[in-house]
Amino acid sequence: MVKAAILGFGTVGSGVYNVLNTNSELIKKRTGEGIEVKYVLDLREFPGHPVDDILTHDFNDIVNDPEVKVVAEVMGGIKPAYDFTKQCLLAKKSVCTSNKELVAKHGPELIKLAKENDVNYFFEASCGGGIPVIRSLNEALIADEIDEISGILNGTTNYILTRMSREGSLFDDVLKDAQDMGYAERNPEADIEGFDAQRKIAILSSIAFGKTVDHEKVYTEGISKITPSDIEFAKEFGCTVKLLAYSRHRDGKYHAFVAPFMVDRENPLYSVDGVFNAIFVHGNMLGDAMFYGSGAGSLPTASAVAADMAQAVKNEGRTVYNNWQEGSIELSPIDTFEGRFFVRIEKSDKETAKRVFGDQTAFKEIALAGSECAFITEVMSEKDFEEKASKLSGIKSRIRVK
Ligand code: HSE
């Protein structure tokens, strides 16, 4: 049995322990060796729980134990996860993580460090929970030039938007409800303002395009300003509102952003509801592939971490190829991106809007928004849109259209 350690016994850590125990026989059969958890690191005590026997509060017990070959870092955050990860890799232990914050910030350095030490730094669970999209990009799609990734990468916001759409509820009310039910964090900013999806699209794009996409340079808008009126107008246009993460490499230019989008019924993302995630990948030979599944939660995420641990065991002494190589990608500014826009305005602005955006623009009105109307523009650059929009006396909202 290969000895393993789990850093952090929270939602994901306890899930990893559970997966490794529940499926221990089949993991043994498939890896040839099996994985035994020798240590669990956590600051808390777990009296009466079987994990109590292998609990340690001291990271040195793990890093100094030569028997430990693979470590699950499921603590989250940068400190102390970054230091612990580096120390494990330097001690020739593979590290498998769900920590998207750490991967987005220090991924290239940790991948390089793993390579220098003939071990692996795996992070399948950092994007899309249990959906095996990272291994697919690195292995199954290795013969393709990936030029576009788009999808729903955050379960919390998708859950909120789904309920707003079904119930016509206000964003704040659904968020509170989601927090009470444990679906949304008490501090929900990273999810609702799009920063979680921003990190995930940066990680996926870095693998797909081969160099680092700096997550802080990915233009990001969240969903906190989406109103029931937006959702009702979306329905009038045969659409629903989704928080999409998007990246594209075309004509030598790279774009990446996270923002709410109107998605029409023909698009498979339209029916991705609740906490599910879905990721479209477009390759120059492949065409489209879509990955769909459980994007969050203890066991789905732990399933991906445990699979990475099994991969690490199967590849002991050898670093598996990762397409995320050294160097960085310069993203083009969002204002050069072209698309259509949904715009909600006061009815009194309708004639000006027609003049500015063109006579052909089709307007919709709904009872819910008595004094308002909405329209969808032709394709134009973000810059052109902002110029035209500034000629109106004030827009209530604008949402990009997929
Ligand atoms: N907060 C994340 C989400 C968890 O809602 O998708 C999974 O990364």
Image (tube, grey):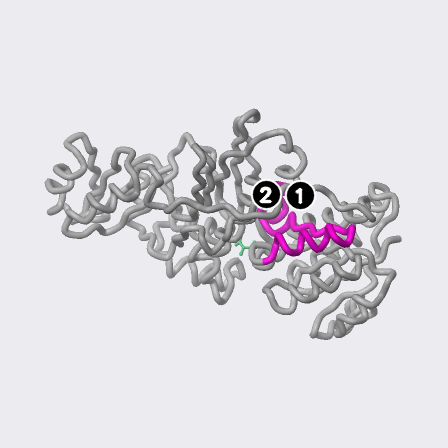
**Dot 2 amino acid type:** Ile
Residue under circle 1?
322
Marks 2 and 1 close (CB-CB < 8 Å): yes
Q: Residues within 10 Å of mark 1 (few under 14, many from 20)?
A: many
Q: Is residue 366 above or below residue 102?
A: above
Q: Which mark is drawn over residue 207?
A: 2
**Dot 1 amino acid type:** Asn
Position in image of residue 374 (x %, y %): 22, 42
Position in image of residue 255 (x %, y %): 43, 42
Q: In this rendered view, identify the residue nearer to me: 354 or 15.
A: 354
Question: SS class of the residue under badge 2?
Answer: helix
Q: How crowded is mark 2: few (under 14 residues within 10 Å), some or many (20 or more)?
A: many
Q: In this view, does 148 lie above or below 76?
A: above
The picture quadrant for ligand 1 comes to bottom right
Instruction: Name the quadrant of the C terminus.
Output: top left
Q: Which of marks 2 and 1 is nearer the N terminus?
A: 2
Outermost residue on the top side: it is 285
Left or right of 175 in this view: 344: left
Q: In this rendered view, identify the residue nearer to me: 236 or 6.
A: 6
- Residue located 46% across and 52% down the image: 157
**274 magenta-colored:** no
Left or right of 186 in this view: 221: left
Q: How many labels does the image show?
A: 2
Position in image of residue 320 (x %, y %): 73, 43
Question: SS class of the residue under badge 1?
Answer: loop
**121 magenta-colored:** yes
Q: In this view, does 374 lie above or below 199?
A: above
Left or right of 360 in this view: 151: right
Which range of residues does the magenta coloring cover?
A: 106-134
Q: Which mark is drawn over residue 218?
A: none
Position in image of residue 104 (x %, y %): 56, 54
Q: Disc 2 and disc 1: Cα gap in Å?
A: 7 Å
